[in-house]
Image (spheres, rainbow, N blue to C red):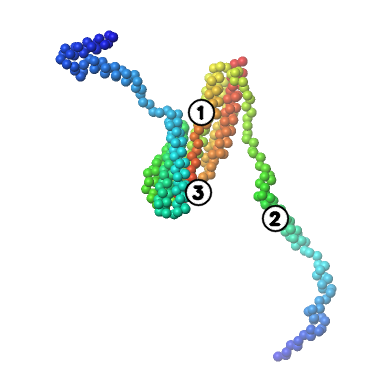
Amino acid sequence: MVKLVYTYALGAYAERRGGSSPLSGTFLLHLFMWLLLFLSLVKPVFAQDTPDLYIQYRTDYLYQRDLYQKDYLDYLNKKDTYAQYGSLTAEKDKITSTKNVFLSQNLMLKNYLMALRVTLPNSPSHQEKLQQWESWLSTQNQLIPNLNSTTSIRTWASTFHTQYIAIQQQLYSSLIQSQIDRRLNTLDEIKKLAQTAGVEWDYNFSDKENKVKQSFQDAIDTTQQNQRQDQFSDFYPEAKEFLDLADIYLRSLISDLKSTIIKNNQ
Amino acid sequence: MDEKPYQNIDLPKNNPLDIPTDLIETKTKKPLNPKVLLIIILGAFIFVLLLVSLIVTQVRKNNSNLFPVLPTPSPTTATPTINDSLIPSPYQDAFKQLEQSLSSDPDLPVPQIDTEIGL
């Protein structure tokens, strides 16, 4: 009520001065209030957190994967039509659908690599290599629209076929590193908890810690296999066995720590 | 130059069709060289082994479960089950978080593509 009287009074004052001014008291008051409101609502913009980015990239990847599957089915249809009729129109349709499936395939792979990259904040070398492949895929997507004949498409597909072996090697190596990083984080958390509870780590758990780390090293060693030139030899199942073994040791560590804490508090 | 007279084939000693009986007997009675015998035995043994290996290979091809492959047991460390209520309350949440972090792998399926497209 007081404000209203004040506002009207200011208006009357302005009227007395000979008309309303753009810088009248009412206007300034409104401006000040809106400024306060704006400052109270606006928050500083920070870089997105890794989990948010991961969720975003993962969603993009899954969406792109659906598109790839759709384009792939279309490609198969056009390929069959061309094989059946062999007409010029059918060939043109086949070339178009092949280009579409290449584009969606590269986007899908790029989105996967991006999602994988943000799970590796502690492995800059993996991040860098993944980023290089992301750039390569982007560059390829700029070239693909220029492929206008079956021969040029075959040449590109052949090049991709060779490069994809290296992409897969990097992809699975990074995937394994990401899983190792996550487990290392868990190991650190176990150690912190032991420290908080006043349990001596070296005396009780260093043996199992070494076994966990050895399993990680064995998993990394599997990624160093030499690849054949024409085919990717999948080392992930072998590495996964070592990661599972590390999980067993980590669970055992947690269990041991529980027992020790219970015993110390009795 | 004197002409060589033809041999008289009617003479018993020079008749090629008339093989003396004592000569035949000595040939049949001659024992085999032990080295040759050894080689024959070894050859027969190798032949039998070859036959057996061929049969076994064929049987294995037809029935792959002839020698069932048992899964290699994975090394396990026995983890005793501990009643969580015994853990002091300040640490219970921390242990729950640790167990959750172990059981949660990021759900990011690896892309599968057809690398024969366009070839």
Marks 3/2 same chain = no
Q: Which amino acid does the dot numbered 3 rest on?
A: Asp
Does A207 appear above or below A224? above
Residue A230: mark? 3
| A224 on left or right of A7 | right
Residue A59 picture location, percent across and down: 45, 33
Residue A40 picture location, percent across and down: 34, 19
Neighbourhood count class around disc 2 (C-alpha, 10 Å): few under 14, some 14–19, many 20 upward = few
Marks 3/1 same chain = yes
Marks 1/2 same chain = no
| B21 on left or right of A90 | right
- List the residue tagged with mark 2: B50
Residue A262 picture location, percent across and down: 60, 18
Chain at numbered mark 1: A
Point 21% across, 16% down: residue? A24
Does B106 appear above or below A154? above
Which of A186/B116 is in front?
A: B116
**Residue that extends furthest to the left in the rendered view of this protein:** A18
Point 71% across, 53% down: residue? B52
Neighbourhood count class around disc 1 (C-alpha, 10 Å): few under 14, some 14–19, many 20 upward = some
Q: Are marks 1 and 2 in contact (CB under 8 Å)?
A: no
Q: CA distance from mark 3 to mark 1?
A: 37 Å
Residue A185: mark? 1
Q: Which amino acid does the dot numbered 1 rest on?
A: Asn
Does B21 appear above or below A130? below
Point 45% across, 54% down: residue? A85
Q: Which amino acid does the dot numbered 2 rest on?
A: Leu
